[in-house]
Image (cartoon, rainbow, N blue to C red):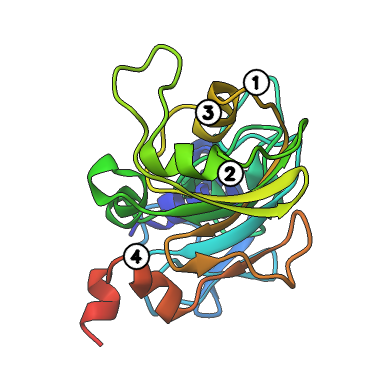
């Protein structure tokens, strides 16, 4: 890779600014000052900017984040802060959410730059299960579990929802597992049976469960087993 392109990505600046920093002798490769943007670096090259090591990305990245309220899952939003604020990773802007949450919904978000991997989570044909802890305005009716198991009719939808599993936790709280991802689905399902969601927290995506040690806004890398539970990327499959 060209050195100026690498600097542009790592520092999140334009190529022109990267070239300026090179001319200012702020960049070394393997301990030697390099001023030419066209200089080619390899995966083994040790690049430093202003005395700080820059890490080259060697493969796809996978993280879980405990999303707090007030943040959106897009990578860029003119009106609201995004979850990228919490990710202290090189070129974090290349990461995307594998299954978004609404601005007022909290809990598990999976972040990756592996499009095929995230597709296995978001594609309707894979029916990836997701579990939510739901807090409701009114008590959980005794017949809601049976209604959700049979499928409910959402407003402006032709087909019933797929069978879902409801477990009552308390008078006004339930744990709901669904296997599809329609727009605002959980809120609309409860609206369809005459209740209103006042808080929503995602606990699980597929076999990946939100780490209870993560405070809101904290994140960690996924383990190899967690990554493989969605589908083995090529890098892991070769090991």
Would you call the spot at circle 1 few (<14 residues within 10 Å), some (14-19), or many (20 or more)? few
| Residue 184 marker | 3
**Residue visible at 47% across and 64% down in the picture:** 62
Above or below: residue 2 compared with residue 101: below
Decide which of tag 1 and tag 4 comes sooner along the chain. 1
Residue 67, position as x, y percentages in the image: 68, 49
Pick the front one: 140 or 44? 140
Picture layout, residue 204 above or below residue 76: below
Dot 2: element:
helix
Cα distance in 3D space between marks 4 and 3: 23 Å
Q: Name the residue under label 4.
A: 230
* Relative vertical location of residue 57 with respect to residue 143 in this rendering, above or below: below
Label 4 crowd bin: few (<14), some (14–19), many (20+), radius 10 Å: some
The alpha-carbon separation of the residues under discs 1 and 4 comes to: 32 Å
Q: Do the residues labelled 1 and 2 touch (CB within 8 Å)?
A: no
Which type of secondary structure does the marked residue at label 4 adopt?
Answer: helix
Gap in angstroms between the C-alphas marked 3 and 2: 47 Å
Q: Which of marks 1 and 3 is nearer the N terminus?
A: 1
Q: Nearer the viewer, mark 3 or mark 2?
A: 3
Instruction: For marks 1 and 3, give the one nearer the viewer.
Output: 3
Q: Can residue 10 be seen in this view?
A: no
Q: How crowded is mark 3: few (under 14 residues within 10 Å), some or many (20 or more)?
A: few
Q: How crowded is mark 2: few (under 14 residues within 10 Å), some or many (20 or more)?
A: some
The earlier-in-sequence mark between 3 and 2 is 2
Measure how far apart labels 1 and 2 are at the Cα level: 29 Å
Asked if residue 47 shows in the view, the reply is yes
Q: Which mark is residue 78?
A: 1
């Amino acid at each position: 890779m060209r050195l100026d392109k690498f600097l542009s990505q790592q520092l999140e600046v334009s190529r022109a600014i990267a070239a300026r920093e090179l001319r200012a002798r702020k960049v070394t490769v393997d301990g030697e000052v390099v001023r030419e943007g066209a200089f080619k670096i390899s995966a083994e090259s040790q690049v430093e900017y202003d005395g700080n090591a820059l890490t080259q990305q060697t493969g796809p990245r996978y993280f879980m984040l405990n999303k707090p309220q007030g943040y959106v899952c897009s990578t860029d939003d003119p009106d609201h802060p995004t979850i990228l604020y919490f990710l202290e990773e090189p070129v974090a802007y290349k990461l995307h959410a594998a299954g978004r949450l609404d601005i007022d919904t909290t809990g598990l978000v999976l972040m990756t730059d592996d499009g095929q991997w995230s597709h296995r989570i978001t594609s309707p044909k894979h029916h990836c299960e997701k579990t939510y802890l739901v807090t409701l305005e009114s008590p959980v009716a005794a017949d809601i579990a049976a209604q959700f198991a049979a499928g409910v009719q959402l407003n402006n939808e032709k087909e019933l929802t797929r069978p879902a599993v409801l477990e009552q936790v308390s008078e006004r709280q339930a744990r709901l597992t669904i296997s599809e991802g329609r727009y605002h689905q959980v809120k609309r399902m409860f609206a369809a049976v005459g209740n209103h969601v006042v808080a929503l927290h995602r606990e699980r995506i597929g076999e990946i469960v939100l780490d209870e040690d993560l405070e809101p806004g904290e994140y960690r890398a996924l383990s190899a087993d967690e990554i493989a539970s969605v589908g083995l990327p090529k890098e892991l499959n070769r090991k």
